[in-house]
Image (spheres, rainbow, N blue to C red):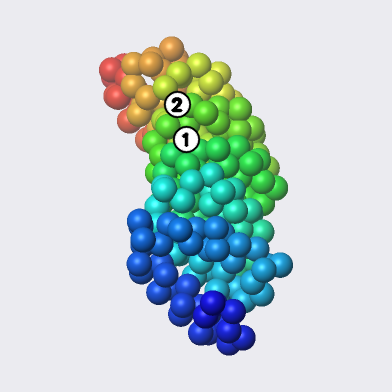
């Protein structure tokens, strides 16, 4: 009832207090916290952020509805603080966040895609979003391409990385190219079939690419 007060600062404090109660005592109020993420219900961004932070403290038990609402909140967030709150809340939901990752990884904004990769890394398994990772590997934004390359290490099946890494080693962005070379080394024996292509990088005009190639060949046992 007190959350109906007109003062947004007071509402923010009340929502924060509910978050401090945490799981399991605050779980009955999950639907209310989810509703506060909707700008049609709550006009104060500070209250919305507090609601996201409260859901984070409630953890995975908040379930499907919270994951969907937080993903929508994150994808539409304008303030950096709001994006961070949404992302951290989804990370706290753990397995419950898996279902919203395809949508976030397909978002048009690079910042949201990178936030989705943060969530994915916290889960430690990218098997359910192979298609989205593949698409991000050819994204226009170099940072997104880098995050996709890093996510190759989260795939249990090396088939996709082995298919994409040869082109990524030749990426126009040096950061992406160097990372692609290094990831091959981190993949170990499962990527040994790419050793010949990595060897060619030893002739690169860029010293950082030559260094990355040398390290990777060492990891593959080719030096």
What distance separates the C-alpha of mark 1 from that of mark 2?
7 Å
Please tell me the numbered disc located at residue 116. none
Q: For residue 209, what is the image quadrant?
A: top left
| Residue 60 placement (x, y as % from top left) | 41, 47
Q: Mark 1 points at which residue?
A: 151
Q: In this view, does 146 lie above or below 78?
A: above
Q: Are marks 1 and 2 in contact (CB under 8 Å)?
A: yes
Say which element carries label 1: helix
What is the number of callouts on the image?
2
Q: For residue 105, what is the image quadrant?
A: top right
Say which element carries label 2: loop
Question: Residue at horizontal 55%, vertical 63%?
Answer: 32
Q: Can residue 90 be seen in this view?
A: yes
Q: In this view, does 67 lie above or below 28?
A: above
Q: For residue 26, what is the image quadrant?
A: bottom left
Q: In this view, does 207 lie to the left or right of 108?
A: left
Q: Which of 151 and 223 is in front in this view?
A: 151
* Other residues around mark 2 within 10 Å, as few (<14) / some (14–19) / many (≥20): some
Question: Residue at horizontal 56%, vertical 24%?
Answer: 164
Q: In this view, does 151 lie to the left or right of 163?
A: left
Q: Which of 176 and 101 is in front in this view?
A: 101
Question: Residue at horizontal 41%, vertical 18%?
Answer: 191
Q: Is residue 7 above or below residue 14?
A: below
On-image quarter of the C terminus: top left
| Residue 35 placement (x, y as % from top left) | 60, 62
Instruction: Work out which residue is located at the far bottom of the displayed protein and give it.
Output: 7
* Other residues around mark 1 within 10 Å, as few (<14) / some (14–19) / many (≥20): many
Q: Is residue 118 visible?
A: no
Q: Mark 2 points at which residue?
A: 155
């Amino acid at each position: 009832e007190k959350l109906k007060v007109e003062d947004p600062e007071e509402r923010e404090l009340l929502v924060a207090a509910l978050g401090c109660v945490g799981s399991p005592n605050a779980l009955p109020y999950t639907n209310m916290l989810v509703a506060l993420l909707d700008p049609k219900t709550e006009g104060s961004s500070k209250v919305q952020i507090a609601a996201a932070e409260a859901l984070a403290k409630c953890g995975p038990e908040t379930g499907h509805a919270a994951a969907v609402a937080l993903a929508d909140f994150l994808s539409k967030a304008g303030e950096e603080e709001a994006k961070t709150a949404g992302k951290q809340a989804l990370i706290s939901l753990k397995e419950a966040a898996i279902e919203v990752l395809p949508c976030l990884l397909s978002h048009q904004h690079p910042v949201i895609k990178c936030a989705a990769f943060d969530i994915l890394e916290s889960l430690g398994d990218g098997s359910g979003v192979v298609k989205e990772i593949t698409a991000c590997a050819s994204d226009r934004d170099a940072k997104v391409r880098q995050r996709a390359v890093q996510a190759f290490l989260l795939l249990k099946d090396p088939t996709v990385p082995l298919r994409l890494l040869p082109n990524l080693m030749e990426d126009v962005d040096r950061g992406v190219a160097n990372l692609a070379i290094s990831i091959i080394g981190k993949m170990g024996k499962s990527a040994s079939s790419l050793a010949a292509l990595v060897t060619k990088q030893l002739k690169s005009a860029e010293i950082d690419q030559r260094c990355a190639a040398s390290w990777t060949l060492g990891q593959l046992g080719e030096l």
